[in-house]
Amino acid sequence: MSTKTSSRTGRRYSPKASASVEAAMHKMKHGQLKSGRGGKGGTVRNPRQAVAIGLSEARRKGAKVPKKKH
């Protein structure tokens, strides 16, 4: 018997958010992703930080992203 997924549960992150994170990871791998206000900080080397930057940018664009955990 096959299990049917509930139609109520949707995506946690929108495709737009995924694309934003993917772009941030690409920039990080090429040494173009900067941290800090206006990109004036140092170069991002940590993949987790790149994901956080990508999600933050997606939030600013209005993509469906869960709220920050504190």
Image (cartoon, grey):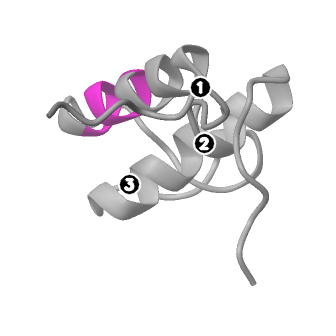
Q: How far is disc 2 from disc 3 in space, using C-alphas?
A: 15 Å
Three-letter amino acid code at disc 1? Ser
Element type at mark 2: helix
Q: Residue at x 53, y 34 (%)?
A: 6
Q: Give whichever of discs 2 and 3 has the lower sequence position.
A: 3
Q: Residue at x 28, y 56 (%)?
A: 47
Q: Are marks 1 and 2 in contact (CB under 8 Å)?
A: no
Q: How far is disc 1 from disc 2 in space, using C-alphas?
A: 25 Å
Left or right: 43, with 12 as reference point: left
Q: Which residue is mark 2?
A: 55
Q: Residue at x 41, y 49 (%)?
A: 50
Image position, residue 59 (x, y; %): 78, 36
Image position, residue 39 (x, y; %): 63, 41
- Nearer to us: label 1 or label 2: 1
- Nearer to us: label 2 or label 3: 2
Q: Residue at x 59, y 40 (%)?
A: 12
Q: Which residue is mark 1?
A: 7
Element type at mark 1: loop
Q: Which image quadrant for residue 33?
A: top left
Numbered range of the magenta stretch: 23-28
Q: Give whichever of discs 1 and 2 has the lower sequence position.
A: 1
Q: Residues within 10 Å of mark 1 (few under 14, many from 20)?
A: few
Instruction: Check the image and report above or below for 43 versus 20.
Output: below
Three-letter amino acid code at disc 3? Val
Q: Residues within 10 Å of mark 3 (few under 14, many from 20)?
A: many
Quarter occupied by the C terminus: bottom right
Q: Is residue 34 covered in magenta? A: no
Quarter occupied by the N terminus: top left
Mark seen at residue 44? 3
Q: Which image quadrant for residue 3?
A: top left
Instruction: Check the image and report above or below for 51 versus 54.
Output: below
Image position, residue 36 (x, y; %): 67, 56
